[in-house]
Every structure is written in structure tokens, then in C-alpha cells.
Image: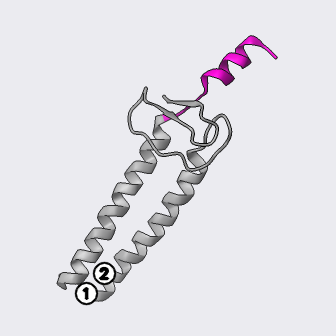
Amino acid sequence: MGIKKRLREKAGGTLRVWRGRVSLVMIWCAGILGALGVICERRAAISRETAMILLAVWIFLDMVIFAVEMNLLRCPNCGKRGLPPRWSRGSVSHCSSCGRNIRWQ
């Protein structure tokens, strides 16, 4: 095994920040959409059908978020899916499965 490969395995891997940002923006949008649907439905500010459409879109968006997190946010070392997203570059997290560092670039 080469020296570079051993150093890379020891140091951990990197993930791109855009993957975490996409996930976080989708989570925020889903939260706002869900809260808006519930609040408007409770206060009768909009029709019940419109509120149900908002809630259905919220549920669909949650399923899309789950799929994005399972496919984009994988540990580069062991392949574990569903890592917690990060917004900023240079942050370091640890994989709960293999324990190696994951740098966000």
C-alpha cells in the first residue's frame, strides 16, 4: 500500500459544502412550509384545501430531503449514509460509524 493512500485513510475524507447547504436549505424550506400550512389552517386564513395542499407539499419535501441526505451525505471513508449537514467550510465532523474525521470543503 502506498504512503499517500495510508495517509489519506488515516486523515479521513472530505465532503463538499454544497451538499450540506442543499440539505439545510431544503430542511429550512420544509419547516417554514409546514409551519405556514399548520398556522394558516388553524386560523382559517386560507381554505382547508389550500392548507392540505401545503401540508402535502411539506410531506413530499420531507421525503425528498431524506433521499438527498441518504445519497449526498455519505461518509467518504466507510460509506455510512445520513451524516448531519454542515454549512461552513473548514468544519470537521466525525463519522459515528468509523470514527474518522470528515472535512467539509
Give the quarter of the image for residue 86. top left
Residue under the image location 39 percent in, 38 percent down: 87
Q: Quadrant of the N terminus?
A: top right
Mark number for residue 51? 2
Give the quarter of the image for residue 53. bottom left
Question: Is residue 35 depicted above or below 42 in this figure?
Answer: above
103 on left or right of 12: left
Mark number for residue 34? none
Tag 2 near tag 1, CB within 8 Å: yes
Is 54 included in the stretch rendered in magenta?
no
Magenta segment boundaries in residue numbering: 1-16
Residue under the image location 46 percent in, 39 percent down: 18
Give the quarter of the image for residue 5. top right
Question: Is residue 8 depicted above or below 52 in this figure?
Answer: above
Residue under numbered circle 1: 47
| 3D distance between C-alphas at marks 2 and 1 | 6 Å
Q: Position of residue 2 (x, y in %)?
A: 78, 14
- Front residue of 81/56: it is 81
